[in-house]
Image (spheres, rainbow, N blue to C red):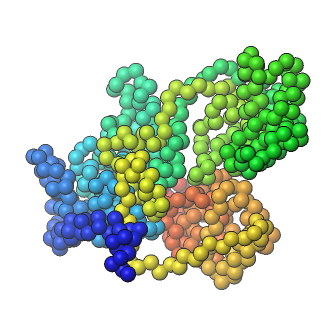
Amino acid sequence: MGLFKNIFGPNAYSNRELKRIEPIKNKVLELDEEYQALSDAELKGKTAEFKERLEDGETLDDILPEALATVREAAWRVLEKKPYPVQIIGAIVLHQGRIAEMKTGEGKTLVACVASYLNALSGLGVHVVTVNDYLAKTQAEEMGKVLRWLGLTVGCILHGLTNEQRRAAYNCDVTYATNNELGFDYLRDNMVTHKEDRVQRAPNFAIVDEVDSILIDEARTPLIISGRGDKSTDLYAIVDRFAKTLTATTVVEMDDKVDQDAINDTADYIIDEKAKTATITQRGVKKAEQAFRVENLMDSENMTLLHHINQAIKANGVMKNDIDYVVKDGEIIIVDEFTGRLMMGRRFNDGLHQAIEAKEGVKIKSESKTLATITFQNFFRLYTKLSGMTGTAMTEEDEFKEIYKLDVIAIPTNKPVIRIDHNDQVYTTEKGKYAAIIEKIKECHDKGQPILVGTVSIEKSELLSAMLKRKGIKHEVLNAKQHAKEAEIVAQAGKYGAVTIATNMAGRGTDIMLGGNAEFLARADLRKREIPEEIITEAIGFAD
């Protein structure tokens, strides 16, 4: 049965590929004793030696075993973390331009560091792509210590850097950045007048962390750079007042079974929950013609008015506060549907943002026009070599092959998995489901067992929070509203008796340790003692 599974099972392809990688991994491990015997100066000197060999015509594959053995020993000396054999396999998979599926907690950050070192020796640059600024910063600090110790330069792209700082970071051997920062810098580089004003080099090699989230879930998300368009008019506010007088009916999905005539008689517009659209009915059109004193709303001269009405009914009927956007400091800030994070500086296009501003009664800003745009899918295909890591890639294996020509290799865990993955539980009503969740939380909490609850939206996380408050259970809520505290809250989700409610992507990539994350506990303690933030950063950081 085991043999049959290996040949025809879901991981059959991975198992065959792992057999091919096995001899390369063994070559790396065989060098361990020899490299342990090297002095610090000799180990550091390997970087210059490898670069010289590459200049003399050798390839990265030729120097791979020695380069990986070097960075493996360096990681031990600098961080006291020696990559396990499975992590070496992961690094080889990344170097080959493939996707490594590694279970949560298997040390993907270190795997990326090992693969980065080898590829950075070419001098063409390596981009390690993370899902948020916090991860880019912490990974650049921690893994950067190993890479800098070996004589390489490490940069980190964060929001708010100047062009000079960005250029310096992109010119480093290894650059840590978020997918958004990389994409927007690429767009800005394509808008400059002079070549020397660009900040990026030619895209060479990218290692994408949480690759399924960035290359599949957000693949079609367009990055847009906008410029000021026509001045905003009062029409948004006028149309919003009109939209608020209309009645809506909601359908799960518009199809042939929906009785259009019945709806036209009773509602002014239809909300399609699945497609997230709002469509005005004949009754709504008649009301609009009367309200705005036009003969035929569908005439070409009334297209602007019709467009404003369509956006107003979408803003009022479809777009929900605390799910699609939040109102903060008098501004409408978009909530990313995939990550639950606030997307600062981003705006809905086609006047939808202005329609929401009118709905929420905040200052309506002028419309903007698109100056440059690209999707993540098209952006990441520009790289000469692309690779990625995630805990969940097999489910999207076909898409990765078809769109990016990337194959997925499932890397075995360092130790057998002892966690039990229970079957899903299905409830007939939402009320019953939430009652069961609260009961389970209470049961775990009474034993002191830490529990992390994942939700799909801010609204759901706050509903659960309200129910826990009524039960008197102390808990932390983590959603887009706590964006800055995200990593610190999630890091403590493993403390005795901790109850943490989080949107599905909040804190992704942060280490949760049973008993609590000592580093974050120390940071909180130092803050209580009123020690300045810059000294805390210096004390717990990985600066040289």
Left or right side of 316 for 388: left
Horizontal arrangement in the rendering, residue 128 relative to residue 420 (left or right): left
Is 54 left, or right, of 161 in this rendering?
left
Q: Is residue 325 above or below residue 455?
A: above
Using the rendered image of the protein, determine whether residue 108 is visible from the camera's viewpoint.
Answer: no
Q: Position of residue 527 (x, y in %)?
A: 57, 61
Residue 67: percent from the left, percent from the top? Answer: 21, 59
**Which residue is at the far bottom?**
447
- Which of these two is toward me, 425 or 12? 12
Q: Residue at x 15, y 56 (%)?
A: 62
Q: Residue at x 55, y 27 (%)?
A: 370
Quadrant of residue 361 in the image?
top right
Where residue 145 sits, quadrant-wise, is bottom left
Image: 57 above or below 468: above
When asked about the image quadrant of residue 487, the answer is bottom right
- 399 sits left or right of 291 in the view: left
**Is residue 506 at all visible to an observer of this figure?**
yes
| Residue farthest along the left direction in this orientation | 56
Q: Nearer the viewer, residue 464 or 432?
A: 432
Foreground residue among 281 and 168? 281
The spot of residue 253 in percent (x, y) is: 71, 48
- Kindly identify the residue that appears in the image at 83 percent across and 29 percent down: 285
Does 180 appear above or below 388? above
Quadrant containing the C terminus is bottom left
Residue 315 horizontal/vertical position (percent): 74, 38
